[in-house]
Amino acid sequence: MNTRDSEKGRMQLRLIRIVVYAILIFLAILCLFSFYMLIINATRSNAQLQGGFALLPRGNFLINFKNAWTDASINIPRGMLNSFIIAALTAVLTTYFSALTAYGIHVYNFKLKNAAFLFIMAVMMIPSQVSAVGFIQMMYKFHLTNNYLPLILPGIAAPIVFFYMKQYLESVLPMEMVEAARMDGSGEFRTFNRIVLPIMKPAIAVQMIFSFVQSWNNYFIPALLLDKAEMKTVPIMIAQLRSADYSKFDMGKVYMFILLAILPVLIVYIILSKSIIKGVTAGSVKG
């Protein structure tokens, strides 16, 4: 009877495993299908795209690439460089200062520590669109339009990233390590930069990916602050292409531009992906 029950249990586990794998494969195909169709559409001409849906690639990839890359109305190489500069600097500043703030809240005990933490969490609840109008007016008043500083420096204040970093520090950073560094004569910034930051590499990699993608895809604020052609970012240029005159509208060129626009994001993800799984899981498990 025990053998029969054991065999039945193994069969049930095997069936559950098959069902789980089938669901995961289906979800993976569902997620990758839109990317696959983007690549397919980037190989089709405008006339072929207007003809309807197709699953197989065509032969217009190089033509669409040339038309998009050399478009006279927009400068795609400059737009991608602009977006990369903004996104890369934002990602670095966001992760570094959020980690530094989380370290200060986690390590130091001071009178208003809980109040400071609650204030940061309250700021996290405020949608960015609520403060956008006042922010834009301030930037116009300070003559900071067509300038990248308003798009980069606000990334220093990132409550969501701070919260993640704090949870991660609580999991991986024992206070004994900080105390030992202090006893050895290490200054606070030296301790943070030489000891704490290397420990936080997985969390930093995860948040750098998220911050880079968020900044790269940001359209709302840049569209309100940047009006010079040489300053525009990729999302603004995509919107500009899509709103072109119908007689000059080329969907193949638009799909190619979108494909080019997501390549830097994929490259950043591939570079930092070794740490992403470890970073996601470590912050939720107390060590």
Image (cartoon, rainbow, N blue to C red):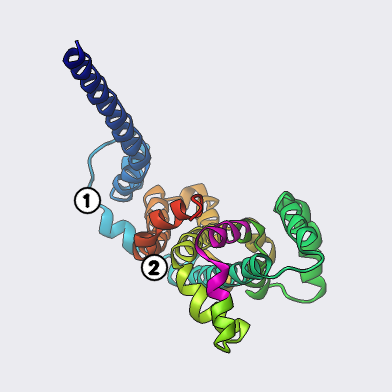
* Residue 68 visible in the snapshot: no
> Can you tell which mark lies on residue 70?
2
| Amino acid identity at mark 2 | Thr
Judge by depth and name the residue closer to the eye, 167 or 46: 167
Figure label count: 2
In the picture provided, is 33 more to the left or to the right than 183? Answer: left
Which stretch is magenta? Answer: 163-178
Q: Residues within 10 Å of mark 1 (few under 14, many from 20)?
A: few
| Amino acid identity at mark 1 | Gly
| Residue at mark 1 | 59
Picture quadrant where residue 90 is located: bottom right
> Can you tell which mark lies on residue 50?
none
Residue 59, placed above or below residue 182: above
Of labels 2 and 1, earlier in sequence is 1
Picture quadrant where residue 97 is located: bottom right
Residue occupying the far bottom of the picture: 185
Residue under the point 31% across and 44% down: 36
Residue 157 location (% of width, % of height):
68, 65
